Image: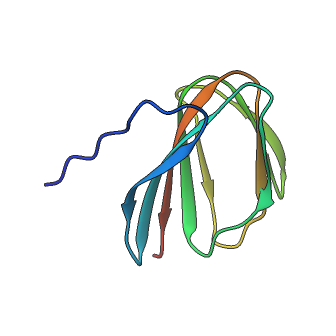
Amino acid sequence: MKKLSANILDGKFEHLLDEDKLQITHLQIKKGEEIPSHKSDKNVVVVIYKGKVDFVGENGNEIIVPGDIITMEANELHALKAIDDSDLMVIKAKI
């Protein structure tokens, strides 16, 4: 067992775990901040636990709030815009 803990950030990101087949990132985005369209070579799971984000994927957009989870296949284009100050966990895995 291994415990990973997120730090309090100021609108930044930190990799809590960064291995070849698995990456876990704590992401903080401030209200109004955007992350431009990008993709990952791994499958992605996004878990929001604070705030509200407009998440844009290849099939449209979803407003996500705590309790919502987004899943994506590898190489799927996506972008984010924070509606409120937000905290997310981004899990990327080669499966």
**Quadrant of the snapshot with the N terminus:** bottom left
Q: How is the image coloured?
A: rainbow
Residue 56 versus residue 32: which sits nearer the camera? 32
Provide residue 86's location: percent of width, then percent of height: 61, 28
Q: Is residue 45 left or right of residue 60?
A: left
Which residue: 84% across, 54% down?
59
Tell me the quarter of the picture where residue 10 sits: top right
Give the farthest residue toward the front: 10
Tell me the quarter of the picture where residue 74 sits: bottom right
Provide residue 64's location: percent of width, then percent of height: 67, 32
Q: Is residue 61 left or right of residue 53?
A: right
**In the rendered image, is residue 55 in sight?**
no
Q: Is residue 78 left or right of residue 7?
A: right
Query: Image height check: is 83 above or below 23?
Result: above
Which residue: 56% across, 67% down?
43
Give the farthest residue toward the left: 1
Query: Image height check: is 58 above or below 22?
Result: above
Provide residue 82's location: percent of width, then percent of height: 74, 31
Which residue: 68% across, 25% down?
52
**Quadrant of the snapshot with the C terminus:** bottom left
Query: Image height check: is 68 above or below 70?
Result: above
Provide residue 14's location: percent of width, then percent of height: 47, 49
Which residue: 56% across, 60% down?
44
Query: Image height check: is 89 above or below 19?
Result: above
Tag count: 0
Residue 18 versus residue 91: which sits nearer the camera? 18
**In the rendered image, is residue 29 in sight?**
yes
